[in-house]
Image (cartoon, rainbow, N blue to C red):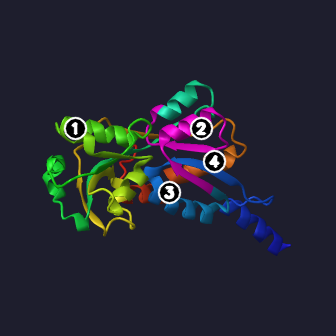
Amino acid sequence: MLRIIAIICACVFSGVSLAGAAEVSIAAASDLNFAFKELVVEYEKATGNHVKLSLGSSGNFYAQIQNGAPFDLYFSADIGYPKKLEEAGLTVPGSLYRYAVGRIVLWAGTASRLDVSKGLDVLREPGIRKIAIANPKHAPYGRAAVAAMESFHVYEAVKEKLILGENISQAAQFIESGACEIGIVALSLALSPAMADKGTYWEIPSDAYPPLEQGAVILKQSKNQDAAGRFLEFLKGSKGQDIMRRYGFTLPE
């Protein structure tokens, strides 16, 4: 009897349901790639729930959700998208959460030998043929990149050299692979283990582009709202916040 009680207590305190673990389907902006892969491991370890993580552009996910895509949670790189879903009655009331503010950097691979410390003026160098950014039509980080180039008065000079990634992760891959000599990517990607030792970056001043306020929301159509809520709470906890800080995100007060 004591052994049975101990098992029940262990399940309750670990968050594992006696009826079986829940699966949470998350649509997340691709700037969260490495941070969320760590976060998911810790969440699954702590709760016993399983996470199905889909990464892509915030705008594309917004369109998919409007058309009924079966996600439980949506983490956007632009809080404007989840706000629109909230206004349309497609979210769980009160679940909207501003989880971070993102930052952008100028990043070049080591092989390029470009001096990114010169800032965005380096984009004018004649040897640069291709510059990678995320597609500004549906990727908030792409819009921030264009705004920053306009702020530094280099956009008109380099716009014909821009190569648009479907999302910010693809833009980073273009530079990392050598397909583009340089580009503007998320700080969270530049700090990741996959990229940290493969290039150098210069952080673009935050006053050069509109704040990348990132928002999350639980979707009303979710069949696993409790598990989705637990993931959001886990993100807000000390372990989740530590992971986000390590990837360069500014956190809400």
Q: Position of residue 82 (x, y in %)?
A: 52, 34
* Closer to the camera in the image, 205 or 226: 205
Q: Find out whether residue 78 is within the magenta segment.
A: yes
**Marking on residue 36:** 3
Q: Pick whichever of labels 1 and 4 is earlier in the sequence.
A: 1
Q: Which residue is outermost to the bottom?
A: 3
Magenta-tinted stretch: 52-80
Look at 44% across and 55% down and name the residue there. 241
**Marking on residue 191:** none
Tell which tag, 3 or 1, sits nearer the viewer. Answer: 1
- According to the picture, the residue beneath numbered tag 4 turns out to be 228
Tell me the element at label 4.
Answer: helix
- Graded by Cα atoms within 10 Å as few (under 14), some (14 to 19) or many (20 or more), the crowding at tag 2 reads some
- Alpha carbons under labels 3 and 4: distance apart: 14 Å
Q: Position of residue 199 (x, y in %)?
A: 27, 65
Q: Pick whichever of labels 3 and 1 is earlier in the sequence.
A: 3
Amino acid type, mark 1: Tyr
Q: Position of residue 110 (x, y in %)?
A: 24, 67
Q: Pick whichever of labels 3 and 4 is earlier in the sequence.
A: 3
**Marking on residue 64:** 2
Q: Is residue 137 left or right of residue 220?
A: left
Tell which tag, 1 or 4, sits nearer the viewer. Answer: 1
Amino acid type, mark 4: Ala
* Closer to the camera in the image, 167 or 95: 167
Q: Find out whether residue 17 is within the magenta segment.
A: no
- According to the picture, the residue beneath numbered tag 1 turns out to be 155
